[in-house]
Image (cartoon, rainbow, N blue to C red):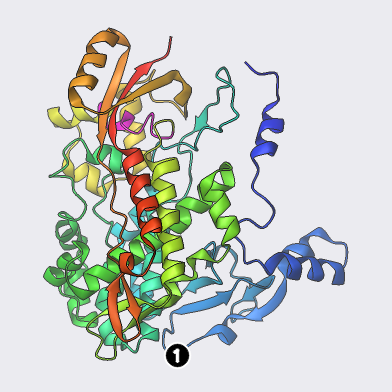
Amino acid sequence: MSTDSSETRFNRWAAPAGFGAHPDFLGDFNRYRENIGTARWKKLLGEKVSLSALADPRHPEVFIIPRDRHLSVIDEWGDVIGFFQTGFPFSSTDFYADLLEGKGVFGELFHCNPFYRLGDIAQLGYLVPPRPDDWLDDQRIAYVIPPFKHTRWIHSLVAAILMEVILARNGFSEKEKAPVVLTVACHDVAMPAGGDSVKRVDPKNLDEEENFSLVMEQSGLVESWVERFGFQLDLAQQWVRGEGLFGRILDVVDKLSYTALDCYAIGMERPGKIRSLCTAYPLIMDVWQDIRFTEDRTAFAFTNAQRLSNFILLRAYEYDEFLFNPYSRAFDLFLKKKVQPLYDSGAVTKKDLLTQGDSWLHGVLRQDYPWEIKAYIEPDLLAWRRVGTKEEADKIQAELGDSFEHSELISGFNLCLDWPVFRGSEIVPLREEISQEQVRMLEDIVEGTKGYYVYYVRG
């Protein structure tokens, strides 16, 4: 074990000051700090601005908060909104969605139990930060469960906010927006407890897209949403599958939301390609503001191909450096292996998984695996080998014997190079607006993730 203290190692990995913030924020914060007294609590408050001053009649339940200044947004009673402010890193804007007092879609979400259940499902499950390149072989660390704290709830809320504002800015009425925004907010409501890892227990039967209608029907809200918001469950189900105009834009805001939140969390933890790209392009997520609909509103596209290309690169880095990084996903199948026998025996049911959250699941598993379900994980206990064919993977598994842990096939990911961009009045796929060199670089990233990965217990 290295003699470096944990504090020394973590300080070396620490993100630069202002990572994820607007590039003008730190300057404004420092000026504010120089102009106030010495009381520490005052430094945290910032310049006061009324929430009502940030109102926009096009989207009355969503307030856009500029991120280039050190602000304290206050409500009508003079209280700072604080934790109710929804951050959107690497962009010019944060948001406030009126979930508590709103009279429309976002106020309705406050009463949607399936939506709030997502607050108990970790967005990234058992995935851990990438292993630093300069980490010695004998340096090991344990991660508290879950290693990343953001949830499916905040991801879904951000996606719904983006959809609300994008549609409002493109001239859609409240009546037109409402069913779409509700669908976006609820697109993950059928994610099973334990997330993607547990979904692999029964992929077809636990698929969140296919179970969307089931969960929404059981919520008891659909009938009232039909009357109040013109919500059509069969149409919403199509959108969740990515079908139609609104299904395609749902797919876009979904990816924008999780990429921003995930890359901020990863970049705060470790240096690497994700942090470097976000530092070079601190407003990379302003790509959401480039979405425009055609005049007849039958299609949409991005107005800035280069900024979209930067986002596509960031998402590719997330897969390469993190989502498909064998170190980061060493325990990604852990919950699946523990839940599988309980699910097969009926001790844990589909209904349980679609109505409960992570805390319930860990409580159940602690009863059956008291010595294995811990408050932490140690990914360095596992090692792995990557090969190109199943035959090679099977041969390695046989050679490993009892030390074999699990294996999986990574078959790549969708680069989204078909996302639409404007070329004058024409709409073309992104791949036609960037250089072939950029396309090949992105495709090489995908190829670099493919293969069979065989995990085994070290030593």
What residue lies at 31% left-to-right and 73% top-to-bottom? 181
- On the image, the x and y values in percent for residue 12 come to 68, 37
Residue 60 location, x and y as percent? 44, 84
Identify which residue is drawn at 31% across, 44% down.
Answer: 195
- Quadrant showing the C terminus: top left
Left or right: 115 with respect to 134? left
Picture residue at 34% right of the left edge, 80% below the top = 423
Question: On screen, 383 above or below 362?
Answer: above
What amino acid is at disc 1?
A: Pro
Residue 223 x/y as whole percent = 16, 73
**Residue 90 or 146: which is nearer the viewer?**
90
The quadrant in which the N terminus is found is: top right
Query: Is residue 5 in view?
Result: yes
Magenta range: 328-337
Q: Quadrant of residue 419?
A: bottom left
**Residue 393 position (above or below residue 253):** above
Residue beneath disc 1: 57
Label count reads: 1
Q: Is residue 332 magenta?
A: yes
The reply to whether residue 124 is in sight is: no
Q: Tag 1, which secondary structure?
A: loop
Q: Percent from the top left, x then y, of residue 352?
A: 22, 42
Q: Nearer the viewer, residue 234 or 430?
A: 430
The secondary structure that most of the magenta stretch takes on is loop
445 vs 37: above or below:
above
Q: Quadrant of residue 157?
A: bottom left
* Residue drawn at (67%, 50%) of the image: 16
Out of 55 and 128, give the one closest to the viewer.
128
Tell whether position 142 is magenta.
no
Q: Residues within 10 Å of mark 1 (few under 14, many from 20)?
A: few
